[in-house]
Image (cartoon, rainbow, N blue to C red):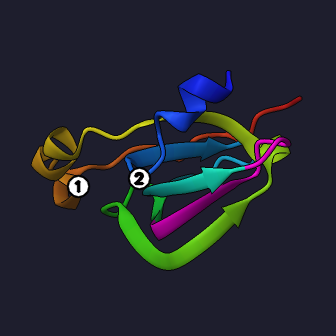
């Protein structure tokens, strides 16, 4: 597992948290408990009635137990997305 996660270091990633929040940022590092550090972090807030909001956070430490999904962010596809006209229901929190 650590080799797979190590491949994310210095790469753009998206993180879906168990409380339903979505974060994007640059993966800086992690520890044995899978706590993660992101830089240039933004929280993406989705709404069915308003465009997606991107709230800058900066450096952010995420507790490993709150991470549901983490994956590589394709910056080219992300930049091509029309977030100004995108309307979608926010993701529900995960029930664990």
- Give x and y (percent) for residue 91: 58, 41
Q: Secondary structure at mark 2?
A: loop
Coordinates of residue 74 in the picture (x, y in percent):
25, 38
Return the mark for residue 83.
1
N-term-proximal mark, 1 vs 2: 2
Q: Is residue 36 left or right of residue 84?
A: right
Q: Residues within 10 Å of mark 2 (few under 14, many from 20)?
A: some
Quickly name the residue at label 2: 10
The reply to whether dot 1 and dot 2 touch (C-beta < 8 Å) is: no
The one nearer the camera, 17 or 70, is 70
Along the horizontal axis of the image, is 78 left or right of 30? left
User: Visible in this render: residue 83?
Assistant: yes
Distance (Cα) linking label 1 and label 2? 25 Å
Q: Residue at x 62, y 70 (%)?
A: 60
- Res 18 seen here: no
Quick check: 42 above or below 9? below
Q: Nearer the viewer, mark 1 or mark 2?
A: 2
Please identify the quarter of the rendering in which residue 63 is found. Answer: bottom right
Write the residue at 34% across / 41% down: 73
Residue 2 sits above or below residue 48 on the image: above
- The magenta-colored residue range is 31-41
Q: Is residue 35 magenta?
A: yes
The x, y position of residue 3, in whole percent, is: 59, 25
Q: Is residue 62 above or below residue 30?
A: below
């Amino acid at each position: 597992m650590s080799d797979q996660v190590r491949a994310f270091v210095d790469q753009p990633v998206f993180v879906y948290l168990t409380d339903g929040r979505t974060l994007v940022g640059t993966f800086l590092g992690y520890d044995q408990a899978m706590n993660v550090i992101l830089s240039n972090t933004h929280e993406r807030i989705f709404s069915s009635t308003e465009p997606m909001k991107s709230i800058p956070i900066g450096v952010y430490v995420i507790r490993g137990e709150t991470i549901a999904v983490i994956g590589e962010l394709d910056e080219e596809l992300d930049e091509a997305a029309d977030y100004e006209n995108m309307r979608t229901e926010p993701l529900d929190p995960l029930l664990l």
